[in-house]
Image (spheres, rainbow, N blue to C red):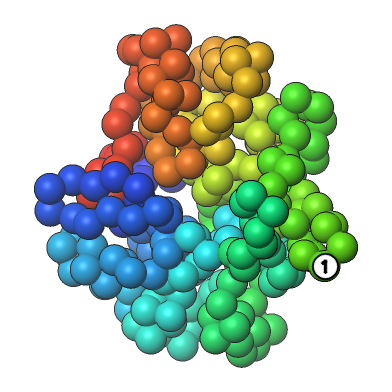
Amino acid sequence: MIKNLKITVVVDNTASRTCLAEHGLAYHIECDSKRIFFDSGKGKIIRYNCDKLDIDPLRTNAFVLSHGHYDHTGGIKYLSEHFSDNVKVYLHPAAFDKKYAKDEDKFRYIGIAKKNKEWIKSKDKLRLFYTEKPTKIFKDIWVTGEVPRIHKIEKTEERFFSRKDINIPDDLIDDQSMFFDTAKGIVVLLGCCHSGIGNTLDYIAEITGRKEIYAVIGGMHLKDVSQKRLNFAAKILEKYKLKLFAPCHCTGQKSAAYLYAKNPDIFNECYAGKTFVI
């Protein structure tokens, strides 16, 4: 069981006065004696924010990717130049797939940049781990791996594609989240949660055998979703009797406001420069 967990939001769409903001997400995690980066943002501000937050990537033990989109992987270039050679990397193999977004009948590439893919693949077998299934990073620190899609209401956005020539949808099976077994309970850290908050929390509950979750922090990809899906998300949070809830990044301001109204006592702001100590 983890005694001390400190999660610092390094990159987010919003920021404190001392940090910069961009469309992206990255966390620095201090977990007892271990240091982990979860995602790396778009890449424009991670150096600046690390300096402002006094975070030294050289001390990192592991790097985890939530999925293969540019706004979570762009900062790999900076981190890879400052990580030690011994850092371990964890990602779902489908994160390497080509990824596109379709906006007004125009495709744009939103996957991992070529040089960042090359750095990941350059890691030897002792330092590169593919996470199709739940995977232990360190003691009491896990990544979900591929999340089963049980709830039909949590359908992946139709604007994502893995091929642009013949419109093959991308179901983002590489989407995964982290969770921690702490003295206060299970803490869940989300990237974009493309798998859906219901599917993700239900899967973590199945893996851990827990009926309650202490905290959920991160992006929930609820921008512009239906009211029916928002209601479903609120019921899921209520189901697990959270004590701390902090949405950010792709959750969407209106959706975050709605979830705040449903859960005012547990709601926390989440932005670059914010630290959660559990």
* Residue occupying the point 58% across, 56% down: 66
Is residue 108 placed above or below 124 in the rendered structure?
above
| Nearer to the camera, 153 or 227 | 227
* Residue occupying the point 38% across, 69% down: 43
Residue 133: give x, y in percent of width and height. Answer: 76, 54
> Callout 1: helix, strand or loop?
loop
Q: Is residue 209 visible?
A: no
Is residue 197 placed above or below 77 in the rendered structure?
above
* Residue occupying the point 35% across, 83% down: 82
Name the quadrant containing residue 99.
bottom right
Is residue 168 placed above or below 277 in the rendered structure?
below
* Residue occupying the point 22% across, 57% down: 20
Q: Classify residue 143 as left or right of residue 49.
A: right
Which kind of residue does numbered mark 1 sit on?
Asp
Which residue bears the numbered disc 1?
A: 165
Residue 127: give x, y in percent of width and height. Answer: 60, 80
Please, which residue is most extreme toward the left here? 17
Is the C terminus in the top left, top right, bottom left or bottom right quadrant? top left
| Nearer to the camera, 144 or 198 | 198
Q: Classify residue 272 as left or right of residue 136.
A: left
Q: Classify residue 49 as left or right of residue 173.
A: left
| Nearer to the camera, 43 or 160 | 160
Q: Is residue 178 visible?
A: yes
Is residue 226 placed above or below 37 in the rendered structure?
above
Name the quadrant containing residue 34.
bottom left
Residue 84: give x, y in percent of width and height. Answer: 40, 84
Residue 107: give x, y in percent of width and height. Answer: 66, 62
How crowded is the residue under tag 1: few (<14 C-alpha within 10 Å), some, or many (20+)?
A: few
